[in-house]
Image (cartoon, helix red, strand yellow):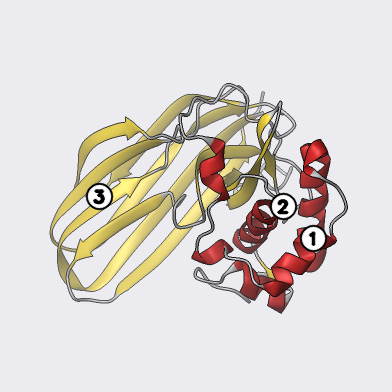
Amino acid sequence: MKLRISHETTYGYDMPIRNLVQSLRLTPSVFEGQKTHEWLIEVTNGLKGPGFRDGAGDWVEGWTVRGPVQEITVRTSGHIETRDTAGVLRGHREIIHPLAYLRDTKPTAPDEALRELAHSVDGSTDDALDLSHRLSSAVTDAIAFRPGVTEAHTTAAEALALGEGVCQDHSHALIALARLRGLPARYVSGYLHSTLDGQPHDAAHAWAEIHVGGLGWVGFDAANRCCPDERYVRLGSGLDSSDAAPIRGVAMGSGAERLDVAVHVEEIAQ
């Protein structure tokens, strides 16, 4: 599938800021399931710094903006060709050992309800792929997809208690369950071409990857009860949503910040 992607993030401040420093994980991953034909990152009045590939195999760029300034826009656009690998992350080069992803973080820390759900799922690590599918289905059944009921800092435990959430909550919950069953798991940020009508749609998305012996990392999208296929574009990964955030930064100033995000993915005619 050939996809055209545009991603625009605008930061507005009620008082001018002096400087902004950002770390951008906005370049598509390099693996067998996707090929980047064209990709551009622009930051309003930004100065591009050095880039590097981190231990997880993600490309990270540093940008700075010198003020005073009251509005900054980060624009990303490009063309990606994808193919279905049944969720398996083949050909992705990284050096972090999978066992590092057994560590809990605040968004994925388990409570008693998460522990009960994790151990209620039949299966064993002897067949880690089957167990991973069962854990993902358990999250789908336990947390209904409903935008607006959770926020950026909602934890997996809180989302499970609510019984509702969005893809971030499904991903955190699945990561928590997998780690409780001894399976390394991590958070993935990216894009999803969610419809087939050829029109652009809001399409920022997130899912989880679980490390399965013999296969490596395998993606599971509990929000949509499936594994990532050719509709998905992978950007980067981390222990949780904050660790895998496409944009992280620090602004020097005392004013309040406003954030507007627009993401569109559309299929290009073959």
Q: Does dot 3 land on a helix, a strand or a loop?
A: loop
User: Dot 1: what SS?
Assistant: helix
* Residue for badge 2: 181
Q: Residues within 10 Å of mark 2 (few under 14, many from 20)?
A: many
Indicate which disc, 2 or 3, sits on the residue closer to the N terminus: 3
Question: Which amino acid lies under the numbered mark 2 shown in the image of this protein?
Answer: Arg
When the figure is inspected, residue 102 is found, relative to residue 118, above or below; the finding is above
User: Is residue 202 in view?
Assistant: no
| Marker count (numbered) | 3
Mark 1, residue position: 119
Where does the image place residue 232, in percent across and percent down from the top left? 64, 39
Q: Secondary structure at mark 2?
A: loop
- Residue type, mark 1 in image: His
What percent of the width, then of the height, locates residue 64?
A: 19, 48
Q: In the rendered image, which residue does mark 3 sit on?
A: 44
Observer able to see residue 74: yes
Q: Are marks 1 and 3 in contact (CB under 8 Å)?
A: no
Label 1 near label 2: C-beta < 8 Å?
A: yes
**Which amino acid type is shown beneath numbered disc 3?**
Thr
